[in-house]
Amino acid sequence: MSYAGDLTPEEAWAKLEQGAVLVDVRTEGEWAHIGIPDTRATDNDPLFIQWTFPGGIPNPDFVKDLKEQAPEDPSAELLFLCRSGQRSIAAATAATQAGFTAYSVLEGFEGEPDRYGERTVNGWKNRGLPTNLGKN
């Protein structure tokens, strides 16, 4: 593993309560139409940095954007979240290579699809963690 580790959504929430920062790496469309994590209870606002743009086009400025937005404290832990837990692994790996302590949140925001293709099985939202309707 080339990053600090994987966390369940509940483990991620516990780390957020201890001062970690969530980095949502989904696309602007996902934030606007599917919802976003609500971390107000942790006193740490999430960061929103796209790992890819619509169509799967990589964000060439991801690490630069992360360095601009991440806490200056070098001991800060960053928790990467995507739709289902795949982009977050790539983002956590890139962040680790850039010198950050990075974790990937398993299951992502929506989780994996059920047998009908609906994302109702697991993930941040389906585990009842706080969410907002969308980011404008």
Image (cartoon, grey):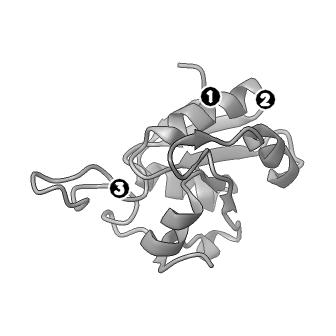
Point out residue 113 in the picture as x, y percentages from the top left corner. Answer: 22, 52
> On the rendered image, what quadrant is the C terminus found in?
bottom right
- Residue drawn at (37%, 66%), measured in percent from left and top? 125
Instruction: Report the side of 63 relative to 136 (left or right).
Output: right
The answer to the question of whether label 1 and label 3 lie on touching residues, with beta carbons closer than 8 A, is: no
| Alpha carbon distance from label 2 to label 1 | 9 Å
- Name the element at disc 2: loop
Residue 98, compared with residue 38, is above or below; it is above
- Residue drawn at (61%, 61%), measured in percent from left and top? 17
* Amino acid at the residue labelled 3: Gly
Identify the disc placed on residue 10.
Answer: none
Residue 20, compared with residue 58, is above or below; it is below
- Name the element at disc 1: helix
For residue 135, which quarter of the picture?
A: bottom right
| Alpha carbon distance from label 2 to label 3 | 27 Å
Identify the disc placed on residue 98.
Answer: 2
- Name the element at disc 3: loop
Identify the disc placed on residue 123.
Answer: 3
The residue wearing badge 1 is 93
In the rendered structure, which disc, 2 or 1, sits on the residue that comes first in sequence? 1
* Amino acid at the residue labelled 2: Ala
* Amino acid at the residue labelled 1: Thr
Point out residue 19 in the picture as x, y percentages from the top left corner. Answer: 70, 56
